Amino acid sequence: AAVAADSREAKTHADLVVVSVHWGAELMDRPKDYQVRLAHAAVDAGADLVLGHHPHVLQGLELYKGRLIAYSLGNFAFGSGSRRCTESIILLAEFDGGALARVRAVPLCVDNHRVNYQPAPLAGAEGRAVLDRLNAISRHLGFSLAVGDSAGSWAPGENP
């Protein structure tokens, strides 16, 4: 209830409202039901973008009422030696007049055994593999990105 109330209040003072939530279960690539309910409530109350973090791995992307929800972006610069937390994305969301106009996802290697705690963009087969996996874990949420060599993308009129 607090996220919805805060989103509603923020919308009275801002052109765009981005909600960032620390939630979810570590190392799980699917959002829990409460995450989906909370994200939808935030959007219903005025949030334009919802960004989740905490699971240390990617979770899916969803487009809900024209608003993007990223349930978990994975790690970025994080002091982990885990072999289970090796991929992430940089998410770029562009808005035009308050409407989501374009989404790009740049795949990253965050395997600290390879990149020494300095996230590195991935391209080619490695980058496509991360984006294909992101699409696979977003499928149940009804979202997919067009996969390119160095980024995934979505714009209105594209799937979904």
Image: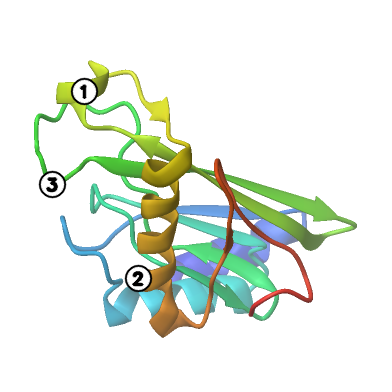
Q: Tell me how far mark 1 sits from mark 3, CA to CA.
A: 13 Å
- Which residue is at 67% across, 81% downward? 65
Residue at the spot of label 1: 114
- Percent position of residue 128, x then y: 44, 51
- Mark earlier in primary sequence (1, 3): 3
- Percent position of residue 157, x then y: 78, 76
Element type at marker 2?
helix
Q: Is residue 22 visible?
A: yes
- Which residue is at 60% across, 73% downward? 43
How many neighbours does mark 1 have within 10 angstroms: few (below 14), some (14-19), or many (20 or more)?
few
**In-front residue for pair 35/45:** 35
Circle 3/circle 2 CB separation < 8 Å: no
Amino acid tagged 3: Arg
Amino acid tagged 2: Ile
Q: Tell me how far mark 1 sits from mark 2, CA to CA.
A: 24 Å
- Which residue is at 39% across, 49% downward? 73
Number of numbered discs present?
3
Q: In this rendering, would 116 be left or right of 97?
A: left
**In-front residue for pair 17/144:** 144
- Mark earlier in primary sequence (1, 2): 1
Circle 1/circle 2 CB separation < 8 Å: no
Q: Nearer the viewer, mark 1 or mark 2?
A: 1
